[in-house]
Image (cartoon, rainbow, N blue to C red):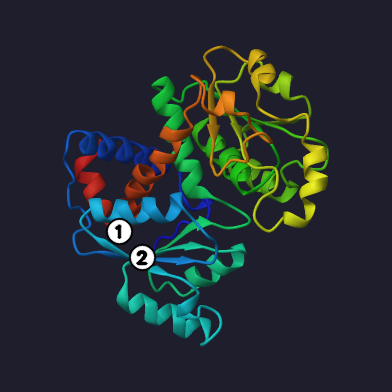
Amino acid sequence: MRHLLTLFDLTPDELKSILATANYLKAELRAGKRPPILDRYTLALLFEKPSLRTRVSFETGMTQLGGNSLFLGEDVGWGKREAPSDFTNVLGQFVDAVACRAKQHDRVEQLASFDAMPVINSLTDLSHPCQAIADVLTIQEAFGSLDNRHLVFVGDGNNVSRSLALACAMLDLRFTLACPKGYELDDEWLGRIKERYPNAKIQQISDPKEAVRDADAIYTDVWTSMGQEAESKIRRKAFANYQINDDLMEAAPSTARVLHCLPAVRGEEITDDVIDGPQSDVINQAGNRMHAQKALLVFLLRPEWIQKNIT
């Protein structure tokens, strides 16, 4: 049984296949076609954190594929009313897959350990693979190809930047993290990437203007993620010079595209002029969450359909 807890669960060829499937399904939708590939399949959405994009994109995506979804909040008693094995194995009797948005990564690892149904990590403190797939899909659309592209993340070594660094290593993109000292990618994650992809092009520097000088995509995220609220004052001070604004964009190529996983704290990590400006792909990026996740669901639940229909 296949799960997606991090992008380490995929090979580069499988990731490319998911991107190709996403492109196909997006084109079909634009043409008014919604092939019922997952007719009568059911996806459970097991969430410990609030969500807009993740919940709506998964629910709508399943509907467009001919299936349905169930939102499971705290009322189902995950980790509270019964043993994890009972909860997970019973859930597996009812649904075909589960997308889990958890506070700690070991929660999705525990779900997957029972092999009751495919488990998709839809966000944890360690990794955000669904976001990264949508992000590289957006870059591919913007430039027509991922060949020789350079993604610069201006922020910290959080779950999103970890996933993007890995996605870039898998697809042979350059990845640069521009961050203040002490906020880099952790050594364990970098070590895992280097072990799997020894030719990975990953760089970490402190000067954001130097970082974006030859960037194709400039990405940022909130300075204070959910669960880090106690650090907000310290983080605002540390990242004060890491805002994506007109001054930073002047140091970048005029062709560079701007990305943000949202929600944004406008006026902190990014200004209104940039996020709403002509170089921004942020709204299309958000929309691509659905197309990427539709492709991922088909990959996990109907891989034979991809083999037959996607070249």
x then y, percent, for residue 107: 57, 69
Judged left or right of residue 184, residue 37 is left
Residue named by callout 1: 301
> Does 77 appear above or below 159?
below
- Quarter of the image for residue 44 reads bottom left
Amino acid found under the numbered disc labelled 2:
Ala
Name which of mark 1 and mark 2 comes first in the sequence: 2
In the rendered image, the quadrant that contains the N terminus is bottom left
- Quarter of the image for residue 94 reads bottom left
Residue positioned 52% across, 81% down in the render? 84
Q: Are marks 1 and 2 in contact (CB under 8 Å)?
A: yes
Residue toward you, 2 or 266: 266
Amino acid found under the numbered disc labelled 1:
Leu
In the rendered image, the quadrant that contains the C terminus is top left
Other-residue count near label 2 (Cα within 10 Å), few / some / many at <14 / 14–19 / ≥20: many
x then y, percent, for residue 208: 73, 25
Residue toward you, 209 or 192: 209
Secondary structure type for disc 1: helix
Other-residue count near label 1 (Cα within 10 Å), few / some / many at <14 / 14–19 / ≥20: some
Whole-angstrom CA distance, mark 1 to mark 2, is 8 Å
> Does 97 appear above or below 137?
below
Residue named by callout 2: 97
Residue positioned 37% across, 54% down in the render? 58
Name the disc covering residue 272, or none: none
x then y, percent, for residue 205: 76, 29
Residue positioned 53% across, 31% down in the render? 259
Q: How many marks?
A: 2
Secondary structure type for disc 2: strand
Residue positioned 60% across, 67% down in the render? 106
Number of the front mark, 1 or 2? 2
- Quarter of the image for residue 91 reads bottom left
Judged left or right of residue 41, residue 123 is right
